[in-house]
Amino acid sequence: MSVVELQIAGFGGQGVVLAGMTIGRGLVLYDNYHVSLTQSFGPEARGSACSVQLMISSDPVMYPYVQQPGMLVAMSQEAFRKFSPHLRDGGLLLVEEDLVGPLVRDDVALARRVRVHTVPATRLAEELGRRLVLNMVMVGFFTAITGLLAPDLARRAVRELVPQGTEALNLAAFEKGFAAGMVQMVQPAGV
């Protein structure tokens, strides 16, 4: 396997870092991949830009920084605007459809020939009564769309990383995202 460069971005308070840690944990501890994770965020606790980058490989990762991601998960308009120009041509763009403008993401898909999949992650999380679990909706969606991480391994990582007492809620969020992704894999979206 060549190195997969993944970037997950949104704003502080969306659980961007936990989403990246969940995917990374599933790949490293349960699937024998090598993963490097770096993160960046603004000085504010909530509302500022936040990003996590994962370098994923079957061999040791020699350089930990994403240069041109092949996959981008954009959970806010600002994240999309800031990071989508770096997405590799032919890459994969997963977006929170209510928070990223459709005309903008469609323009990027056409101009860059990237595959785009959208999910109403915030709405799905709100159906569970907790908007904060939109990150696990995105992890489930990512798992279904990419096939990079086996669903059972992702579920295990969710159970082990989320705060104690919230496992059932976070797993329900994961399942909502996973189901939404599986529907799109049966009927592919994008360019």
Image (cartoon, helix red, strand yellow):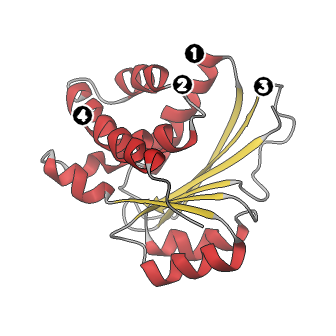
Q: What quarter of the picture does the C terminus occupy?
A: bottom right
Q: Secondary structure at mark 4?
A: helix
Classify mark 2: residues with Cα within 10 Å, few (<14), some (14-19) or many (20+): many
Relative side of 25 to 158, left or right: right
Tell me whether circle 3 and circle 2 mark residues in contact (CB < 8 Å).
Answer: no
Q: CA distance from mark 3 to mark 4?
A: 30 Å
Q: Earlier in the sequence, mark 3 or mark 2?
A: 2
Q: Which mark is residue 172?
A: 4
The residue carrying mark 3 is 58
Q: Which mark is residue 30?
A: 1
Q: Amino acid at mark 4?
A: Ala
Relative side of 51 to 61, left or right: left
Q: Amino acid at mark 1?
A: Tyr
Q: Position of residue 153 (x, y in %)?
A: 48, 20
> Residue, x 79% and y 57% (percent of image)?
67
Tell me whether circle 1 and circle 4 mark residues in contact (CB < 8 Å).
Answer: no
